[in-house]
Amino acid sequence: MNQRNSRRPFPLRPAFLFRYLLCLLFFPAVAVCADDNPPPPKDLTELPIEALMQIEVPQVFSASKYEQKATAAPSSTTVITADEIKRYGYRTLADVLASVQGFYVSDDRDTAFLGTRGVNLGDFNSRILLLVNGHRVNNDLDDGAGIDTAFILDVDLIDRIEIIRGPGSVLYGNNAFFGVINVITRTGKQVDGTEVSASYGSYNAASGRVTFGSQFTNGLQMLLSGTLYHSDGAGNLFYKEYDTPSQNNGIAHNLDGDGFGSLFGSVSYKDFTWEAAYVDRRKDNPTAQYDTTFNATGLTTRDDRTYTVLKYAHKSPDLADISANIYFDQSDVSIGYPISPSFFKEEQTGQWAGGEVQIDKKIFDRHVLTVGAEVRDDFNQSRRVFEPSTGDVLTDVHASRYNYGVFAQGDFAVVTNLHVNAGVRFDEYEHFDPSLSPRVALIYNPFAQSTFKLIYGTAFRDPNFLELSAPGFEGIRPEKITSLEGIYEQGINQNLRSSLSVYYNRMDDLIDFENGSFTNFDADTLGLEMALEGKWANDIRTRLSYSLQHTENTSDDAGLPDSPMHLVKFNLSVPLLKDKIFAGLEVQYTSSSHTVYSDLSGDTLNGPDSPGYAVVNLTLFSHDLIKNLDASVGVYNLGNNQYYVPSSRFHLQSSIQQDGINFRLKLTYRF
């Protein structure tokens, strides 16, 4: 980060004032915030931020599509590392995201739905763009992306996760509505051998993984990994909505099973990288969703997701950096519907291919210009609902769609401590008017360790294939968001980094399923996010965040379902034996939410509010206590809290109970 060249007698005095304000806000009585020592005589504005802090400012790629410090990115960012995943015992990507400021997860025992900045409409996470190494994972059927056991990667393969908040269509186009999540995998060089991992936990949940990675003397790198997982799920689940003798008194018995198999491989040599991934996930659903017969076997969702991509990236300091890729993706979904006395089945298939090219040019070592283009052909989209026993077909829909986008962005150093980042993207999808997505950010560093950002941006989400293939879809309009956000990031002494974000989102024509068909409505959110991260010399690490998000449906002056106003997250990692054994404590609080549900006639009704809840997780993790062996034991929902999260509009239940206390034991050995 560029620093101011001017000299002043006490260069950090304004920073001290902000630091004390933040300490009062987060830790009113924490003595560590006090500073009894006068500032050193050396002009600290001459030093890079990293020289002033033990806690490192992370690098991010996804905010601008090139590497930069998080403090220079035109957005609010969070980076979660592989080390944190191990220390806190995260089992899925959903576990990771639930720990991050401004995010919350609702699981209806079939799918984990990600909410962010006050919006979670239970539509398969189509308003967050999920990437793996920069490749889009959202499918072309419902534009969804699995974050639970349907996620295409084993979390053990993750090197870091970059979370970029705010509209991201300026670089990514469709689906980057509330933000972008880019999961960066480990490389063959990082693995450097063979890993074998196994776990066992509650509900007879067991997994096994084998990973091989290496970098050869000629520079070739390769990584190959496979994982199998199975869980019986909870044996008995009670739903009062079905509490009659003919429906087993509301108890769903042995209907919560889960399992997947996944593969991931990558090969890189010089400027080229080939990558492929596959997951086959099968989830039994105990909730009698979609008005199916309660406590009947067969309500099962099977998700297959595949992609392969060939990438090229070449850096030329004298000319320009160029990157390009071509890819092929496929998504297959099948769902069984036991509706006594019949059984129906739905099959969905999506296939698409495309490519992207991007050029980055640095000018005078002060400015960065980026231009790019992307093209994609969804050449096969199909949905079929039929009765297998008779062959009767209820629904048979086929479609295709073509789209392209071009974008340009510039990061300009107006003066050494003031940058302007501005860009725009033009997208055209078949069947809809073109979309123009601008973003402008002012990034100001008035003194050492301090950054102010002011960001304006827009994004869009076009109706997906399933929304367009539903009855009565005519007139459904694309979604659009306009966002204004102010961000203040501050380093506090050598151990703490803090951030404060205030944002306003105006959302036009959000698409929702109501009373048996899709419809549009408008909403807005006014929110605040505060976070404090600490890293100490004895390797104690802390994270604390608070999110206030007030969202209103402005079309009918009502609140949104599954939109908690308050989120509190706290993480603490403490070494019990230096560099060998760590204890990780996590506390999450989510306030109450409105709920909705569908009655037997298909009408969407308001349900009672889902109460607020707190969850405590504890993990013990050991690294190389025995040479080459990592071990962990995690206890989740330590207080055995019986809590509920809002369901989707396809349930008779307004809220779905979550798991009580449960555990996982995991061993990983490196050869």
Image: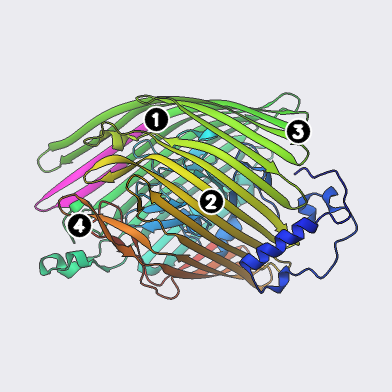
Q: CA–CA distance between discs 3 and 2? A: 36 Å
- 541 or 104: nearer the viewer: 104
Q: CA–CA distance between discs 3 and 1? A: 39 Å
Specify which label sits upstream in the sequence, 3 or 1. Answer: 1
Q: CA–CA distance between discs 3 and 4? A: 63 Å
Give residue 157's mark. 2
Specify which label sits upstream in the sequence, 3 or 2. Answer: 2
Q: Nearer the viewer, mark 1 or mark 2?
A: 1
Q: Quadrant of residue 107?
A: bottom left
Q: On the image, numbered disc 3 is attached to which residue?
A: 366
Crowding near pointer 1: few (<14 within 10 Å), some, many (20+)?
A: many
- At 26% from the left and 29% from the top, the residue drawn is 398
Give residue 352's mark. 1
Q: On the image, numbered disc 4 is attached to which residue?
A: 297
Tell whether label 1 touches label 4 (CB within 8 Å). Answer: no
Q: CA–CA distance between discs 1 and 2? A: 25 Å
Q: Is residue 527 left or right of residue 498?
A: left
Q: Is residue 452 left or right of residue 210?
A: right
Crowding near pointer 4: few (<14 within 10 Å), some, many (20+)?
A: some
Residue 360 sits above or below residue 87 on the image: above
Mark 1: which amino acid? Trp
Mark 3: which amino acid? Arg
Q: Nearer the viewer, mark 3 or mark 1?
A: 3
Q: Nearer the viewer, mark 3 or mark 4?
A: 3
Q: Is residue 340 magenta?
A: yes
Q: CA–CA distance between discs 4 and 1? A: 33 Å
Residue stretch in magenta: 333-351
